[in-house]
Amino acid sequence: MIVPLTLPQKAWRVAVVLLAAVLFLGGTFVGDDDWWPFSPWRMFSTSTDPNGAVRSTFIEVRTAAAPATWVEAPISPDSVGLNRAEIEGNIDRIAKDPAMLKTLADSHTALRPDDPSWVGIRVVVRNYLLRDGGPTGQHRDDLVAEWRAS
């Protein structure tokens, strides 16, 4: 047996749909990424130039055990307490103030006390070059910021 909705039941459903629509539209036109899930979904509204580059951010570190050698290190909650997106979201701030990278070294030491401490960190953006939408096998690295322990 089908029971029709009462007027109050219909009204609250309409109100929820209208509220969600207002939040999504507000997020789209005036919001920023930290408004998620009501933020603008820029990643779905843009595309990469088929003859451009795909960017990937990573960090390289120098350790107390090997201070002359840069090695790639993971950007993960287990390693530095952050995800890569959190570094990418602050990349302009990090470029202006590389001393912010000391926080990663401190976090790494706290999370992995048995590993050699980090005495240098640099943020690198690797640009994987494309031709006709496919990889060329070539890349270009851009150094964004570098921090060294004093």
Image (tube, rainbow, N blue to C red):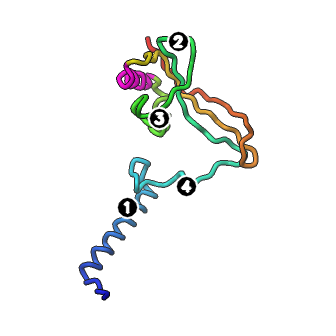
- C-beta proximity under 8 Å, tags 3 and 2: no
Instruction: From the image, state whether disc 4 or disc 2 is nearer to you.
Output: 2
Could you tell me how far apart the alpha carbons at marks 3 and 1 are, in whole angstroms? 27 Å
Residue 38 at what x, y percent from top left?
40, 56
- Helix, strand, or loop for circle 3? helix
Q: Which mark is residue 87?
A: 3
Amino acid type of disc 2? Ala
Residue 20 at what x, y percent from top left?
37, 65
Q: Mark 4 points at which residue?
A: 44
Could you tell me how far apart the alpha carbons at marks 4 and 3 are, in whole angstroms? 21 Å
Position of the N terminus by quadrant: bottom left
Q: Measuring 47% from the left and 40% from the top, which residue is drawn there? A: 85
Residue 111 forms part of the magenta stretch:
yes
Instruction: From the image, state whether disc 3 or disc 2 is nearer to you.
Output: 2
Q: Name the residue under label 1.
A: 23
Q: Measuring 31% from the left and 74% from the top, which residue is drawn there? A: 13
Residue found at the far front of this picture:
1
- Helix, strand, or loop for circle 2? loop
- C-beta proximity under 8 Å, tags 3 and 1: no
Could you tell me how far apart the alpha carbons at marks 4 and 1 are, in whole angstroms? 18 Å
Disc nearer the start of the sequence (4/1): 1
Disc nearer the start of the sequence (2/1): 1
Amino acid type of disc 3? Ile
Amino acid type of disc 4? Phe
Could you tell me how far apart the alpha carbons at marks 4 and 2 are, in whole angstroms? 42 Å
